[in-house]
Image (tube, rainbow, N blue to C red):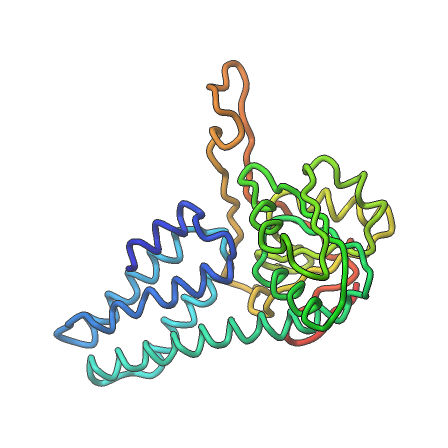
Amino acid sequence: MIDDTVEQIREEQIQSTSIAAVKAAEALRELVTREYHTVEDFMRSLVRNSRALRQANQSHAMLYTTQQRIIAEVNEFDPETVDAAQERLEAVVREIVIGIKSSKEQAAETAATLIEDGDVLLTHGYSSTVVATLNCALESGKQFELYVTESRPQYLGRKMARRFANRDGIDVTLIVDGAVGYYLSEADRVVVGMNCVIGETVYNHVGTYPLVATAASEGVPVTVVGPASKFIGSGFEFSNEFGLASEVLLEPAEGFDIGNPAYDSTPTRLLETVVTEDGVMRF
């Protein structure tokens, strides 16, 4: 399970960073079923496997913070037996998974209050917290239009568009990335997720920055939504990921290079709000 999860995260088969953090935490439950001679053997195995999960994608800040927390809390418990260490690991993983899911739900409920009935919204990429936000708005009886960028080169927007296709109360239009300037003239709000926030910078799926900058120029408010655990303090250094050239061009690139970064950085000064389970921050 751990090896499979490492591969899924490394190959970006899990698009949502919070879901990746949950799956990585749950993968460590495999260690609860293994046999160890000593607590030291168990802790070495836990640290080694946690490091493998964490390093599968070094741009996933939430993956980093949750894995660090698991190691710290099991270690601080100072278990005297292997059974006690395994029970503590199981408890910490359960707390983290419940906490992530709960924080996403609370953030989504709060962000949904910023959506007005009849709004035209625009989103980019695929965020499970944005999905939850839109679901909350729909469940409250609001109706709105949604423009979804394709979010190339992995076409994450197609997944988002299909998620809400044929749902009552929402009209969905999938648009090419280069058309955001055209459709922003119709939008009342941009809603996007986040990989993480470090200082005064939001890191998210590449294409977020030009979308937000254009929205700011056009006077369209931008809301970023996600769990507060994606606000990162010291100890984490964001490292961008770069996709394969074949994601952009099927034939060989002869005489030129291909740039395919996974994330870009957006200054918080361009945003109207960042919403977490702790409330709404205005900029």
Residue 75 in percent (x, y) is at 33, 77
Where 241 falls versus 21 (above or below)? above
Quadrant where the image shows the N terminus: bottom left
**Where on the picture, by quarter, is residue 141?**
bottom right
Q: Residue at x 81, y 38 (%)?
A: 182
The answer to which of 68 and 244 lies nearer the viewer is 244
Q: Residue furthest top?
A: 255
Q: Residue at x 71, y 57 (%)?
A: 170
The answer to which of 197 and 99 lies nearer the viewer is 99
The answer to which of 152 and 74 lies nearer the viewer is 152
The answer to which of 6 and 110 lies nearer the viewer is 110
Where 162 falls versus 154 (above or below)? below
Residue 15 in percent (x, y) is at 50, 52
Q: Residue at x 15, y 72 (%)?
A: 36
Q: Residue at x 35, y 53 (%)?
A: 6
Where 46 falls versus 16 (above or below)? below
Residue 14 in percent (x, y) is at 45, 53
Left or right: 247, with 34 as reference point: right
Left or right: 281, with 130 as reference point: right
